Image: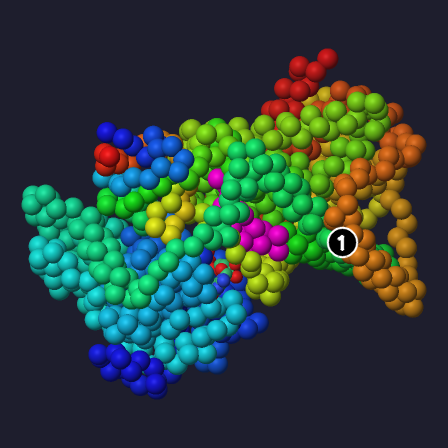
């Protein structure tokens, strides 16, 4: 059936389509729709050269492409530019324009704009249930007749109406342009479009006329430039004229589609009175953050331990094979440990993504940005930067990925470069080791001061970048979406896909780093004092002498600390106390350990679920000093220990964070970030060495 | 000349002009804040800034300084 009321017949009835793109305002349900159409075959990738996620799904021989949410082809953010360029440079075979039926008048201009792209299209009136709840009585058939393309009403979250979509889009016609502009603009458009040989000529001409930097032939550019001058002489601003005509037409269409409206207060009106309350709001918000934190770390901890257990068993088996010592060590301490390091991030990432996607899709993320905006503004950051920064105290890796919710690259850059200074949970064991030996009663105070120092350095970094990096200032303009209960299935699928995309990408680089460190430690074979590691550490120790850190064993541990901070403790142990002999493990004994580790993880998850709703408890106080602590006391002064901790706090957090930075910011900024972190760490530690009594 | 940041919570007015430029202007237009639109100030954030306004079915947050660029009709 397709589109019985459409004026133009379908161009190629029954043809098979290759690529269908979903275009729509942010939060109109595009991702939910793709999921409803294609089920579990969701894929998350990155758009080439950018940090924005690319979601694709296969449906038979169709590929559904989820474009970033966009208000208009007149792009104001990198995501919008991306959506526009994807449409113009590599036009899909058909478009599904997804509109929020409950906010139709504001959503329609995008559909009108899309009619100028010269691509077969169908319109989806999604969120039809919400429209009804808001008291709108809409007539999709009328809109279909007015626009001349199929219009389908859907409730994507419940799968209602989606079965009609594929058929509608496969028989969709190329629409006639839906807006007629004032005569002067039409003449200019005709002139510019005449110089463009593409189906989207009219859309491109409109963009050029408004001064948008889109790819176009030189003749078209020149024509647009001339036309702009002529229009300016007439006192006409092409952008205002073009958008004005679209808004006016959208209003007409909306009013003709509307059968009736009796407004009703919605859940959002009622909830926001509490969530955005001047006093209650911030309290609720802090509690919410605490909950996200506890959710992530309580639930992931048992699985991180489980991965550690599996790693131990695999290493034990490797040692049990009777291979030559160096080879066994390479396999167990290099390869197995490397893969284990990557996998140990997976549970944390998964649960954090889950929490983040929930916050984002439910509407809470935008509210938290609203509440925190004033605070973040002081550091030149937008309100949305608050959550990534706070997440950094848990783990820098997902925190860096969480900067994706920021609108501009400038904001993402500022925030992402500040995150590595947030003292993540992996730095705590190092702090705890030293603080317990050297600062006894004041241990908690020292650790707290370190956290604050990290935060201060991070915020200062963001501020300096904004001040001197010639970055555009952040804006506070954003939409607060209505509250919605996201589908658990979509959240789980998305969290899984994103986690896997990290694991796939990060395994190579982290493994490489791990193998390098292994080689340093184990080559040439023999005692540690004669290894490459000791030699490099000895050279570095000269560099650190001005900080009062001349001991190669201390300085050396910073090298594997580059892989992950918790490794520093182990490395100190090896340097100060010597390596523990590897435990070989029989096959059956190993299986037993695996089963036990799995059971412990399940048990831990259960306990975590219970603890989630209980009160936070402080970690139990450690017993007497360990052998390592005793050795450290003999080797370092309290002041040197503090300087060491300052350096550990501020220097490059871990390879995984670097990998995340590279994915988000590119190679150049990541290199800059490493240099910057090392310099800052060294200078602040030097300062500490000078001013501490 | 009244401006958007001078409304009291709950008050409604019609937009006469938007005196900003570039990205902020385009974003405000896209969200419905353009000449002729009716806007209502809903609330201010806990520290007084930003503001939340309602235009049609959209809820829009914007900073005080950005709201100053939105000129309202008298009366
Ligand atoms: N009630 C209702 N909720 C829906 C419907 N479609 C989607 N949602 C919900 O709306 C929210 C946003 O949906 P998404 O699919 O993430 O929207 P999107 O268009 O992909 O958003 P962006 O990627 O930000 O542009 C989610 O919480 C969905 O569960 C619908 O038809 N009815
Ligand atoms: Mg989406």
Q: Is residue A487 above or below residue A222?
A: below
Nearer the observer, A677 or B73: B73
**Residue annotated with mark 1:** A609
Farthest residue toward the front?
A262
Is residue A203 rendered to the left or right of residue B47?
Answer: left
Q: Is residue A601 above or below residue A272?
A: below
Q: Is residue A356 magenta?
A: yes
Whether residue B69 appears in this view of the structure is: no
* Residue A126 on image: x %, y %: 42, 66
User: Is residue A173 visible from the viewing direction of this image?
Assistant: yes
Q: Is A189 placed left or right of A315 in the picture?
A: left
Q: Nearer the viewer, residue A632 or A113?
A: A113
From which residue to which does the magenta span run? A353-370
Q: Image point 46% across, 38% down: which residue?
A: A382
Residue plotted at (31% across, 74% down): A141
Q: Please, which chain is the residue tagged with disc 1 on?
A: A
Quarter the N terminus of chain A occupies = bottom left
């Amino acid at each position: 059936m397709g589109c019985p009321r459409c004026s133009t017949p379908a161009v190629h009835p029954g043809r098979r389509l290759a690529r269908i793109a979903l275009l729509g305002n942010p939060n109109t349900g595009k991702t939910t729709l793709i999921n409803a159409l294609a089920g579990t075959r969701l894929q998350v990738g990155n758009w080439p050269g950018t940090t924005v996620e690319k979601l694709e799904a296969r449906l038979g021989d169709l590929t559904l492409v989820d474009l970033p949410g966009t208000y208009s082809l007149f792009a104001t953010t990198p995501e919008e530019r991306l959506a526009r360029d994807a449409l113009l440079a590599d036009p899909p075979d058909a478009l599904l324009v997804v509109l929020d039926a409950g906010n139709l008048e504001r959503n329609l201009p995008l559909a009108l704009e899309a009619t100028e792209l010269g691509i077969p299209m169908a319109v989806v009136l999604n969120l039809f249930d919400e429209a009804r709840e808001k008291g709108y009585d809409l007539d999709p058939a009328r809109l279909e007749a007015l626009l001349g393309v199929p219009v389908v009403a859907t409730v994507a979250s419940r799968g209602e109406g989606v079965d009609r979509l594929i058929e509608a889009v496969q028989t969709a016609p190329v629409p006639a342009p839906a807006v007629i502009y004032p005569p002067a603009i039409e003449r200019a458009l005709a002139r510019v479009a005449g110089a463009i040989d593409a189906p989207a000529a009219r859309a491109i001409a409109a963009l050029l006329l408004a001064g948008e930097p889109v790819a176009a032939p030189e003749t078209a550019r020149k024509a647009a430039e001339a036309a702009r001058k002529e229009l300016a002489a007439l006192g006409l601003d092409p952008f205002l004229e073009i958008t004005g005509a679209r808004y006016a037409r959208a209003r007409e269409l909306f009013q003709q589609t509307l059968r009736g409206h009796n407004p009703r207060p919605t859940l959002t009106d009622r909830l926001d009175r509490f969530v955005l309350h001047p006093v209650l709001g911030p309290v609720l918000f802090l509690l919410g953050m605490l909950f996200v934190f506890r959710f992530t770390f309580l639930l992931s901890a048992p699985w991180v331990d489980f991965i550690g257990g599996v790693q131990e068993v695999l290493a034990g088996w490797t040692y049990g094979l009777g291979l030559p010592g160096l080879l066994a060590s390479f396999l167990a301490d290099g390869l197995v440990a490397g893969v284990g390091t990557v996998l140990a991030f997976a549970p944390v990432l998964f649960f954090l993504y889950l929490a983040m996607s929930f916050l984002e899709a439910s509407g809470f993320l935008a509210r938290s940005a609203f509440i925190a905006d004033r605070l973040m503004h002081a550091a030149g950051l937008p309100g949305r930067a608050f959550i990534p920064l706070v997440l950094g105290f848990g783990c820098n890796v997902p925190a860096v990925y969480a900067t994706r919710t920021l609108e501009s690259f400038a904001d993402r850059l500022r925030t992402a470069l500040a995150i590595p200074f947030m003292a993540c949970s992996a730095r705590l064991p190092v702090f705890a080791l030293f603080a317990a030996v050297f600062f006894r009663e004041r241990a908690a105070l020292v650790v707290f001061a370190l956290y604050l120092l990290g935060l201060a350095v991070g915020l200062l970094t963001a501020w300096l970048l904004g001040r001197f990096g010639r970055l555009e200032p952040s804006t506070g303009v954003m939409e607060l979406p209505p509250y919605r209960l996201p589908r658990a299935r979509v959240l789980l699928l998305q969290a899984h896909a994103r986690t896997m995309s990290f694991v796939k990408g990060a395994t190579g680089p982290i493994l490489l780093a791990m193998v390098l460190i292994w080689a340093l430690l184990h080559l040439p074979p023999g005692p540690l004092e004669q290894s490459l590691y000791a030699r490099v550490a000895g050279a570095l120790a000269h560099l650190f002498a001005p900080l009062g850190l001349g001991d190669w064993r201390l300085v050396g541990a910073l090298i594997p600390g580059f892989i992950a901070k918790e490794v520093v403790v182990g490395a100190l142990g090896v340097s100060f106390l010597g390596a523990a002999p590897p435990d070989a493990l029989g096959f059956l004994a190993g299986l037993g350990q695996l089963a036990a580790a799995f059971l412990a993880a399940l048990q831990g998850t259960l306990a975590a679920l219970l603890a989630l709703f209980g009160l936070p408890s402080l970690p139990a106080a450690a017993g007497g000093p360990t052998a390592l602590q005793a050795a450290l006391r003999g080797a370092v002064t309290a002041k040197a220990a503090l300087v060491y901790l300052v350096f550990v706090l501020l220097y490059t957090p871990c390879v995984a964070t670097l990998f995340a930075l590279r994915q988000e910011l590119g190679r150049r900024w990541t290199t800059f970030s490493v240099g910057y972190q090392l310099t800052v760490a060294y200078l602040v530690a030097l300062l500490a060495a000078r001013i501490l009594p | 000349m009244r401006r958007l940041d001078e409304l009291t919570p709950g008050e409604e007015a019609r937009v006469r002009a938007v005196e900003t430029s570039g990205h902020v202007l385009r974003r405000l237009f896209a969200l419905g804040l353009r000449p002729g639109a009716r806007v209502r100030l809903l609330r201010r954030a806990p520290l007084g800034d930003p503001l939340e306004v309602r235009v049609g079915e959209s809820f829009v947050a914007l900073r005080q300084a950005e709201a100053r660029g939105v000129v309202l009709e008298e009366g």
